[in-house]
Amino acid sequence: MTYGFLNIDSAGITERANLGWGSHSDRADGMSANRLRTAVGWLPIPVMLIAAGWFALIHVREPAAAASPMHVAAITSAKPVSLGSTVGLAKQPSFDPATSEAIVPEQPAPVDRLKISSQSWRRGGLGSNALVTMTVRNDNSYAVKDVDIACAFSRPDGSYLTERSRVIPDVVNMKSRKTFVRLHVGFVNVYAAKAKCAPVAANHI
């Protein structure tokens, strides 16, 4: 009876051992399968990266290959144009009076048609005041006012001495003349012997 008991126990121990080993083998097989599935799942990513790099390389080469013939064609097509040929030359714009702005000639200033037809001067006060009598002629087609008169005084030998000016606020009508008597133009040196007056500015009315 003891022998039989030992055999049963030995058989049971052996079967358990066999069951334990079988379980470990199944786990190893399962882990290997999982690793294989994981490796297969990651496999498309490197393939996609390689394919993307290949397509990018092809697209980079294609523009470079296409640009070279165009550059060569541009160089070969540049030919000198003969002087007698008008092909490719821009046409000169034609002048159209209807669409172009009218060129208005510059109008003369009002003072350009003002003249002093006659003039004379004398001393006033204690001999230092210059009093000028003059006739201003207006040849403009409009009236003028605020006529600025400048008078240059000189010594008896004709050398320049001094200059004085005066604005006449009166109006001189168009195509007419006006005389101003004893117009005070300022103080002058006692050596002044001659005077010459001229209009330098005027306002249009």
Image: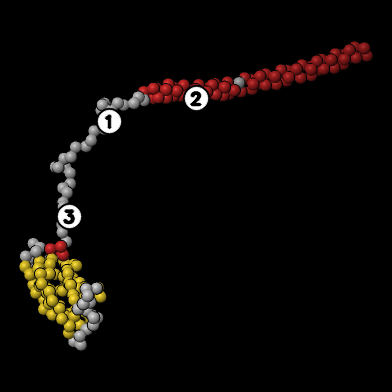
* Nearest to viewer (mark 2 / mark 3): 3
Earlier residue among tags 3 and 1: 1
Residue type pointed to by label 2: Val
Q: CA distance from mark 3 to mark 1?
A: 36 Å
Which residue does the image show at 12% across and 63% down from the upper left? Answer: 113
Res. 118 image quadrant = bottom left
The residue lying furthest to the left in this view is 176
| Numbered disc 2: secondary structure | helix
Q: CA distance from mark 2 to mark 3?
A: 66 Å
Q: Is residue 74 above or below residue 106?
A: above
Please tell me which residue lies in front, 162 or 99. Answer: 162
Which residue does the image show at 23% across and 77% down from the upper left? Answer: 155
The residue lying furthest to the right in this view is 2
Residue 156 at x, y = what percent? Answer: 21, 77
| Numbered disc 1: secondary structure | loop
Tell me the quadrant of the picture where the N terminus can be found.
top right
Residue type pointed to by label 3: Glu
Please tell me which residue lies in front, 97 or 61. Answer: 97
> Residue 106, labelled with which disc?
3
Residue with the mark numbered 1? 89
> Residue 50, can we see it?
yes
Residue 23 at x, y = what percent? Answer: 75, 19
Residue 186 at x, y = what percent? Answer: 21, 79
Residue with the mark numbered 2? 60
